[in-house]
Each structure stands twice: as C-alpha cells, then as structure tokens.
Image: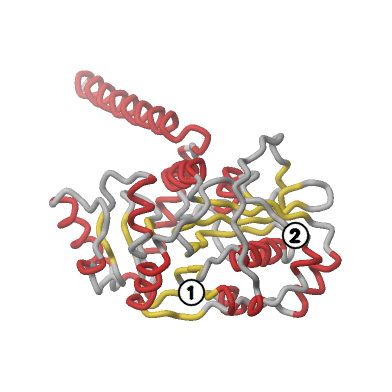
C-alpha cells in the first residue's frame, strides 16, 4: 500500500513538474504577451463551449477530421484558395511554420489565422464583409460628436497596448473568449515592427487610451482585425480617422471578415470570395508604405469629410517616434 502511494505521488509530482516547465517555456516564448495559466484554462474552456453551440456544433466533426488529415500531411504553410473545404466554411488547413511572412502571404490570398485554442488554422469566407473606401459612411450623430470631441487620434503609437485591449473585456463577450491569443499578438506585433500591421489609438482629454483597433496592410487593401472601445463612440471616431486616411492614400477596400451591425452601419457589404480574391489580385501587390503612419487631420476636419470625393495623396514615410507608455482606461 505504501509503495503504491509513493509511486502515485512520484507520478503526480513528475506530471506537475512537466506542466510547470511547459508553462515557464510558454511564458518565456510569449514574453510581454504571456497570459496567466488560469486565463489559459478559461480561454480553452470558453472556446470549447463556443464550438459546441448549436449553430456551430454541426461543423465540428468536419473540422476535426480535416484538421487531423492536414496535420498528418504536415500542415499547411500558405493556404491555397483552390483547396479550401466547404464545411466548415472555407477552412484552409492547420497553419504550419506560421510566421509574419506566412501570415502576410496568406493575406494576399484572402486568408487569415484564427483559433480560440490549439494550433492556428487558416480561414477565409465564401461571403466577405468588405468596404470600398468611397462607400464609407459616418452617421450624423458621429459627425456631431467628432466636431466637439476633445479626443485625439494617432496611428502606430501604442500597437501592443491596442492589441492587448482588443483581446480583453468587451460588451456582450465573456472575458477570456478571444481568438487574439499570445501567438496572434506576437505575430502581429512583429508585422507591425516590419511596417505591415498598423494601429489607431483614441486618447481622451486626460491622455488615456480609451479606444482603438489594428489591422494589416496588403498593397492597397486593409484588413481590419479588431477594435475596442472603453468610452462611447471612441472606436468609431478612430475608425473614421482610419478610413479618411486610407481613402486619401489610395486604398481601395477595407476587409472586415464577418457581418456585424457595426460594419453594416459603416457601409460594409457582403462580397463573394471570388470577387474579393480578384480585388486582392489587382490591388494586393501594389506598393504600400512600410513605415509608421501619421494622422494629418483633427477629428473636427474629418467630421466634414465626404468619402465619395476623397483626394489621393502620398502615404506618410515618417518613422515612429518613441513615446512614454500610455495610460489605459480600464474596461467597465
């Protein structure tokens, strides 16, 4: 009896040591984006429950089967639009050797990495929410708010803080259910360092970061990845500033991936995958700036802007200026 207890204790201790070592290695790998073990467990749990919801559970067997087959084959480095699966919707494979270079190459074909937990997977959509820059709309209420707002919008001044906020608490979303994992944060932070990913930040009168978003620039197409807002209309003001500059710099479209009421209000419309791929083929290889972006107009001026009559300018080439760490307003 004593021997059995000793063996069991040894096994438990060894298993615990192994888990602790793995967590330590993961924390070192993720660096400033590392999450606590408790948050990891919560994210995996909520991600599992998300996949078991009635509207998604029917796709789960196909997803597990196609993922297993692709893993056995060695995974997919850069997805091929001709080899996607119809079920689940436009699954492109399990990401292999995922890096900033492969994320950028996949985006040129319309794919993005996405997963709540486990290995990253490549996805696209048969129907994509896309906004032509000339079709962007600001509501009268947003224009009125922007004319009087004491807020300030910047580009590329706090990318890492923005992506962390996008992964955090949101209205109507459980804290911990996020696809913006430490792996995603590291990838896009490096893409930002290389000049391909950009952020917009909204600061209130006290200099606190209260809204923002980030995305990926591919030629003259921008992929909006995520946004956050800790004050009413903060992200909307930042997004309007983004669209104002994208239009002036000659960008033709902004991709939002899936339909949401907010995107519809801004003018995004569903576009068939083939049509979106044609846009990328024509404009995704155009020259684009790879330096930090700068804001050239205040909110009051942007509030008077008509997207349909935007003039094209040369994108900025000014390097990012170092600044002190921002204060970030906590979510309610």
Identify which residue, 231 or 308, lies in the foreground: 308
Q: Residue at x 45, y 55 (%)?
A: 179
The mark closer to the camera, 1 or 2, is 2
Task: Tell me the quadrant of the picture where the C terminus can be found.
Answer: bottom right
**Residue 163, image x, y percentages:** 56, 49
Tell me how many marks there are. 2
Q: Is residue 257 visible?
A: yes
From the viewer's perspective, tell me whether residue 95 is left or right of residue 270.
left
Residue 4 vs 98, above or below: the answer is above
Residue 307 vs 302, above or below: the answer is below
Identify which residue, 11 or 223, lies in the foreground: 223
Q: Residue at x 71, y 40 (%)?
A: 326
Upstream in sequence: badge 1 or badge 2: 1
Q: Is residue 332 visible?
A: no
Residue 106 vs 39, above or below: the answer is below
**Residue 193, image x, y percentages:** 51, 41
Packing grade of label 1 (10 A; few <14, some 14-19, many >=20) is many
**Residue 156, image x, y percentages:** 61, 47
Q: Which mark is residue 43?
A: none
Q: Which mark is residue 130?
A: 1
- For label 1, the SS is strand
């Amino acid at each position: 009896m004593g021997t059995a207890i000793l063996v069991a204790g040894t096994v438990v201790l060894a298993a615990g040591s192994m888990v602790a070592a793995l967590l330590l290695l993961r924390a070192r790998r993720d660096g400033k984006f590392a999450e606590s073990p408790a948050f990891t467990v919560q994210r995996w749990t909520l991600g599992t429950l998300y996949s078991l919801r009635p509207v998604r559970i029917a796709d789960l067997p196909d997803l597990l089967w196609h993922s297993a087959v692709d893993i056995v084959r060695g995974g997919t480095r850069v997805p091929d639009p001709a080899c996607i699966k119809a079920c689940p919707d436009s699954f492109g494979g399990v990401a292999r050797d995922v890096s900033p270079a492969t994320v950028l190459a996949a985006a040129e074909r319309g794919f993005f990495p996405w997963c709540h937990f486990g290995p990253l997977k490549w996805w696209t959509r048969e129907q994509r929410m896309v906004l032509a820059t000339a079709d962007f709309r600001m509501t009268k209420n947003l224009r009125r708010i922007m004319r009087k707002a004491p807020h300030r919008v910047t580009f590329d001044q706090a990318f890492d803080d923005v992506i962390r906020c996008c992964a955090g608490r949101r209205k109507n979303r459980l804290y911990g259910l996020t696809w913006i994992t430490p792996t995603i944060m590291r990838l896009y932070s490096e893409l930002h360092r290389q000049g391909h990913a950009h952020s917009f930040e909204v600061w209130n009168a006290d200099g606190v970061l209260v809204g923002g978003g980030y995305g990926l620039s591919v030629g003259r197409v921008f992929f909006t990845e995520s946004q956050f807002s800790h004050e009413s209309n903060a992200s909307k003001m930042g997004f309007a500033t983004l669209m104002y500059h994208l239009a002036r710099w000659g960008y033709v479209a902004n991709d939002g991936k899936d339909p949401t009421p907010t995107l519809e209000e801004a003018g995004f419309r569903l576009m068939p995958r083939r049509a979106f791929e044609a846009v990328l083929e024509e404009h995704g290889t155009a020259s684009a700036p790879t330096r930090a972006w700068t804001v050239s107009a205040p909110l009051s001026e942007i509030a008077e802007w008509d997207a349909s009559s935007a003039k094209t300018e040369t994108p900025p080439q000014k390097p990012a200026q170092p600044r002190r760490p921002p204060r970030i307003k906590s979510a309610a």
